[in-house]
């Protein structure tokens, strides 16, 4: 008999895998040349004023982040978070509009001339039910607020407009897509934000597209012992669908993901379940592969219905899909240069390809306007996001450092974009060559029967 203790636990093996990836990324960093940007930007004096402003704001920014961490609110319910942000802005003479663009927990504030280019700094502040800030969105918020406030005193030098946009429900509602459809990014030339992570600092990361589907089966109830032949078992159908998806996983692209839960499966063992349901997420690295994966999963659902004599209904995209992030390398290089100046080692996402295969609604912004989503480390390699362990790390000294470094580097990057027409032209040229602005609602259709 095999001794089970001879094998590491799944969690130990997973942690070891993440630590190997981090070592590989560190090796890549040691041999890779530092990323730099050839553009003049806003100038050293503007950058120095930004750094001084962030230093002056330190206590307020860290206080904001800690307050949000201690009082987590899920998506679309971040009322106290938005109020705290609005209060801090008001203390600095900035009026923020809450309930912006039709979302009660969205926020918008702006400063500058109102003419010339406009850059939006994006703040997230939603938390995970039961885990709290296990994704560190309080850090995103504090850094974004800091970047915006640090920009206010230099906008007379840079020209243009800075916007702080509070974006609710990244975790459970694709809030940025809802804001985009309501016009939040109309007239905005670029968008920037940071996100906390474990492992190395990254100027970009391979975020996947995401969509969801709810599948429901309807059968026929019957006495499970006296007359099972009269029934059609909806639970059998949903189990067959779940197993079909499991079998599919070995025949999909390495970056594709399908994962789900059975949400309903009957009420009593002596009744053939008349209704059963499941909820799945699908992810892929491109819109095309996400569409193909969706079609294959739809056919599995229909096959399970045929096997069991039940009927099936599918409901796709209760929340709008997230599309894969299109990073703007020109803007990301500028950010990386500023973050490196604060003593951090910043890698491109290609140096750590397996470091982030989650999804974010920033992707939906990034195919409308140039955008960046760099990752700043706040936890040791091997600490998974969306866990209580990461939430604990996200309130320590490294989290505080990420708030301040992120605020300064974001503000410097925005100031450069507003000041430097050559930089803006290069950012826009890259965006155009990558496909330009896309009509996000039309990218993914609802799968239908073949």
Image (spheres, grey):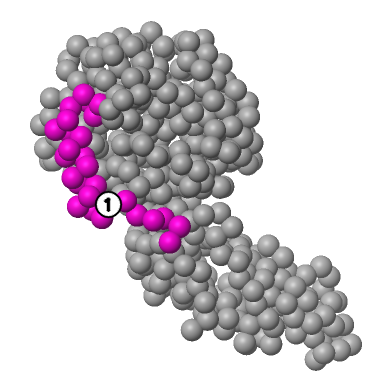
Residue lying furthest front in this view?
115
Whole-percent x, y for residue 275 in the image: 75, 73
Which of 176/324 is in front?
176
Which residue is drawn at the image coordinates 39% and 20% (left, top)? 111
Q: Is residue 106 visible?
A: yes
Which residue is drawn at the image coordinates 48% and 10% (left, top)? 93
**Residue 113: quadrant of the picture:** top left
Q: Which residues are magenta?
A: 416-442
**Relative side of 220 to 328, left or right:** right
**Relative side of 52 to 386, left or right:** left
Q: Is residue 297 placed above or below 17 in the rendered structure?
A: below
Q: Is residue 138 placed above or below 92 in the rendered structure?
A: below
Task: Check disc 1 and report the residue beneath it.
Answer: 436
Give the main secondary structure of the magenta stretch. helix
Q: How many numbered callouts?
A: 1
Which of 238/92 is in front?
92
Q: Is residue 13 placed above or below 305 in the rendered structure?
A: above
Q: Is residue 404 visible?
A: no
Residue 433 falls within the magenta-colored stretch? yes
Which residue is drawn at the image coordinates 63% and 82% (left, top)? 305
Secondary structure beneath disc 1? Answer: loop
Which residue is drawn at the image coordinates 79% and 82% (left, top)? 220
**Relative side of 336 to 10, left or right:** left
**Residue 227: quadrant of the picture:** bottom right
């Amino acid at each position: 008999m095999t001794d089970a203790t001879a094998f590491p636990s799944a969690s130990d093996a997973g942690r070891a895998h993440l630590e190997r990836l981090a070592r590989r990324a560190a090796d890549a960093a040691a041999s890779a040349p530092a990323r730099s940007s050839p553009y003049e930007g806003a100038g050293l004096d503007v950058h120095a004023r930004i750094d001084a402003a962030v230093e002056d704001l330190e206590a307020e920014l860290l206080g904001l982040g800690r307050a949000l961490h201690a009082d987590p609110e899920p998506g679309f319910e971040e009322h106290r978070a938005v109020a705290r942000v609005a209060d801090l802005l008001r203390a600095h003479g900035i009026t923020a509009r809450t309930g912006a663009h039709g979302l009660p927990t969205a926020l918008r504030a702006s400063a500058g001339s109102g003419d010339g280019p406009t850059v939006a700094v994006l703040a997230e502040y939603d938390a995970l039910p039961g885990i709290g800030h296990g994704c560190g969105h309080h850090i995103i918020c504090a850094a974004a607020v800091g970047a915006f406030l640090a920009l206010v005193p230099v906008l007379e030098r840079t020209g243009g407009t800075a916007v702080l946009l509070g974006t609710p429900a990244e975790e459970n509602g694709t809030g940025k897509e809802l804001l985009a459809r309501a016009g939040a990014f109309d007239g905005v030339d670029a968008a920037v934000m940071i996100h906390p992570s474990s492992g190395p600092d990254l100027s970009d990361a391979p975020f996947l597209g995401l969509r969801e589907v709810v599948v429901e089966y309807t059968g026929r109830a019957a006495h499970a012992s006296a007359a099972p032949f009269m029934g059609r078992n909806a639970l059998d159908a949903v189990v067959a669908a779940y197993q079909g998806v499991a079998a599919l996983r070995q025949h999909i692209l390495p970056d594709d993901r399908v994962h789900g839960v059975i949400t309903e499966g009957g009420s009593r063992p002596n009744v053939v379940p008349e209704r059963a349901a499941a909820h799945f997420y699908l992810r892929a690295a491109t819109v095309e592969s996400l569409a193909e994966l969706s079609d294959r999963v739809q056919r599995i659902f229909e096959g399970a219905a045929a096997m069991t004599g039940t009927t099936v209904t599918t409901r796709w995209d209760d929340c709008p899909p997230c599309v894969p992030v299109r990073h703007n390398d020109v803007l990301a290089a500028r950010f990386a240069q500023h973050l490196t100046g604060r003593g951090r080692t910043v890698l491109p996402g290609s140096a750590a390809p397996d470091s982030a295969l989650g999804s974010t609604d920033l992707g939906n912004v990034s195919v409308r306007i140039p955008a960046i989503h760099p990752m700043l480390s706040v936890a040791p390699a091997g600490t998974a996001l969306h866990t209580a362990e990461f939430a604990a790390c996200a309130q320590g000294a490294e989290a505080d450092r990420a708030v301040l470094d992120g605020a300064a580097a974001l503000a410097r990057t925005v100031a450069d974009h507003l000041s430097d027409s050559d930089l803006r032209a290069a950012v826009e040229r890259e965006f155009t060559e990558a496909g330009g602005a896309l009509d996000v609602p039309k990218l993914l259709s609802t799968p239908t029967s073949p």
